[in-house]
Image (cartoon, rainbow, N blue to C red):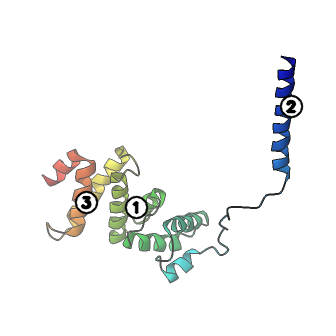
Amino acid sequence: MIRRKHTIKITLFLAVLLFMTQGCLGKKETVKLMSAPENRVSCNQALSMGLDGISNNDLGVILDRELLENDQSCWKQLVLKSLDQDRNIPMLHIARAVHAFNANKSENEFSLATHKYFLEIVRGGRVYQKQDQDLMKAYVSFEIKRAKTKNDNRLKRAKLVCKRLDNDLYRKFFL
C-alpha cells in the first residue's frame, strides 16, 4: 500500500515536471496567423475603386467607421452603391438608410432601402414588429401611389414582401 502511494506520487511528480518543461521550452509556430491589413480602405477609396474588390465584412467595417466619424455624405453614397449592387450590408445600416433616404427627399433611394430592409426581415435578419408594420403601410402606400402600371417592378417587390410578412395588410391593399 505504501509502495503504491509512493509510485503514484512519483508518477504525478513526473507528469507535472513534464508539463512544466513543455511550457518552458520554446516552440516552433505550426500555424501562421493572418496579419491584419496594413492599409485600411476609406469610404472615398471604396467609392472610387468600386465595391467589387471589397468583401462584405470590409464593407460593413467601412460603413461603421463612417458612422463613427459622422461622415453622412460618403456613408449615403456608399450605402446607395451597395443597395444598387445588392450587396449584403448589416441590418443597422439598412435601417439607417430607410430613415436617411426619406421618401420626401429621395424616392428611388427610399424604395431601394426599404425593400432591402423588409427583404432582410423575410430572410430572418430580424423579427417583424409593430413599428415595421407602420413602415410597411407607408412603404406599400408609397409604391402604390408611385406605380405607373399594375406591373410596375417596384410595386411587385412591395407586394411580395408585404405578402410574406403581413397577410392582413396584403389583403387590405391588394385584394
Dot 1 surroundings within 10 Å: few (below 14), some, or many (20 or more)? many
Label 3, secondary structure: give it.
Answer: helix
For disc 3, the marked residue is: 158
Label 1's element?
helix
Q: Earlier in the sequence, mark 1 or mark 3?
A: 1
Q: Is residue 6 left or right of residue 136?
A: right
- Discs 3/2, front: 2
Q: On residue 146, which mark appears?
A: none
Q: In the image, residue 84 lies at what x, y percent?
A: 37, 73
N-terminal of the two: label 1 or label 2?
2
Q: Looking at the image, which residue is at 84% across and 54% down?
A: 25
Location of the N terminus (image quadrant): top right
Residue 152, percent from left and from top: 19, 69
Given residues 111 and 84, the one toward you in this image is 84
Label 2: few (<14), some (14–19) or many (≥20) C-alpha neighbours in 10 Å: few
Label for residue 98?
Answer: 1
- Residue found at the very far bottom of the displayed protein: 48
User: Looking at this view, is 8 or 113 the one in front?
Assistant: 8
Q: Residue drawn at (32%, 49%), measured in percent from left and top?
A: 134
Q: Give the labeled residue for mark 2.
A: 10
Q: Is residue 1 above or below residue 160?
A: above
Amino acid type indicated by mark 3: Ala
Q: Nearer the viewer, mark 1 or mark 3?
A: 3
Q: Along the horizontal axis of the image, is 45 left or right of 109?
A: right
